[in-house]
Image (cartoon, helix red, strand yellow):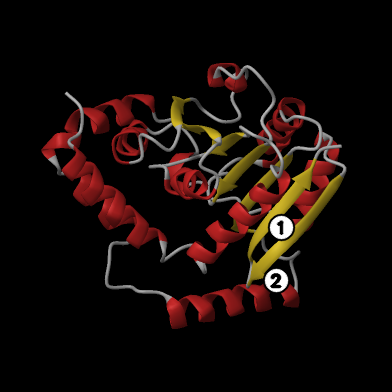
Amino acid sequence: MGVSMAAARTWVERWEQQQQRYAVDREERFTVISDVVEHICAGRTRPLLLDLGCGPGSLSARLARRLPGAEIVAVDMDPVLLELGRTHHGDAARYVDAVIGENGWTDALGLDRGPDAAVSTTALHYLPAPVLLETYRSLAALLRPGGALVNGDHFPAAEGPCSHLTAHVGRRRAERTGDHRHDDWESWWRDAAADPELTDLFERRERCRPASGGDGANHHLPLDRHTELLRQAGFSHVAPVWQVGDSRVLVALKD
């Protein structure tokens, strides 16, 4: 039995609210990612977009509104979030269950051509550097020539005074603009797990969760390390295009 539209709407709306605690200027970050994708896809009648770590479809839904002719493939490993996305944002994307970074994960996507862009937001930082490098290599091989990887996340500066300053600026910005009346990460998952409509999905989630990593892992490699890994993976041009504190949108272009 699937999740009802009413339940999916409730949990996706609460997800949106709790995520605002963690991504500084989250909506502006989404808008910047969409700006970049729109520019990369200019003149293409049906661009193909890949949403990495899509969760319940937050970024896919925004991209679908900005580029209504795009084909979007949204990938995640969490059965709870995927089902919420399929139900609430079903028209935005085709949702795929796959573990990003595992051997052969791109085969599960069922793509018949190279994507114009791969996007992600607050989703890849749990990958350790060696897995991230292989993921970047897979994406560099997958994207069409001229395609882009557009990643919004926290990319701190290298260790030192500047790293502490960027983190401080981001925290202060979040304090001024954030709304902390809503769920945090732990309360969202606790309350969702208590919803009878989601019981089967949470049982499946427990069976498929990796033995290590997952929710608790948080690597947040510095910006220069991401840049190094992206260049090693075959992206010739790498640059941040937006920043508030250490929250950035990092773009990597394929020749």
What's the mark number on residue 222? 1
Looking at the image, residue 104 lies above or below residue 222: above
Asked if residue 62 lies left or right of residue 120, the reply is left
The foreground one among 180 and 62 is 62
Residue 208 occupies quadrant: top left
What's the mark number on residue 155? none
The foreground one among 45 and 155 is 45
**Residue receiving disc 2:** 163
From the top left corner, tell me how far across and down residue 83 is, in percent.
31, 33
Local SS, label 1 = loop
Q: Judge the density around disc 1: few (<14), some (14-19), many (≥20) Cα neighbours within 10 Å.
A: some
From the top left corner, tell me how far across and down residue 192 is, in percent.
22, 46
The foreground one among 30 and 248 is 30
Q: Earlier in the sequence, mark 1 or mark 2?
A: 2
Residue 110 occupies quadrant: top right
Local SS, label 2 = helix
Q: Are marks 1 and 2 in contact (CB under 8 Å)?
A: yes
Q: Residue at x 40, y 30 (%)?
A: 209
- Name the quadrant of the N terminus: top left
Type of the residue with mark 1: Pro
Asked if residue 62 lies left or right of residue 105, the reply is left
From the top left corner, tell me how far across and down residue 164 is, in percent.
66, 75
From the top left corner, tell me how far across and down residue 48 is, in percent.
61, 32
Type of the residue with mark 2: Ser
Find the distance from the CA under tag 1 to the CA under tag 2.
9 Å
Q: Judge the density around disc 2: few (<14), some (14-19), many (≥20) Cα neighbours within 10 Å.
A: some
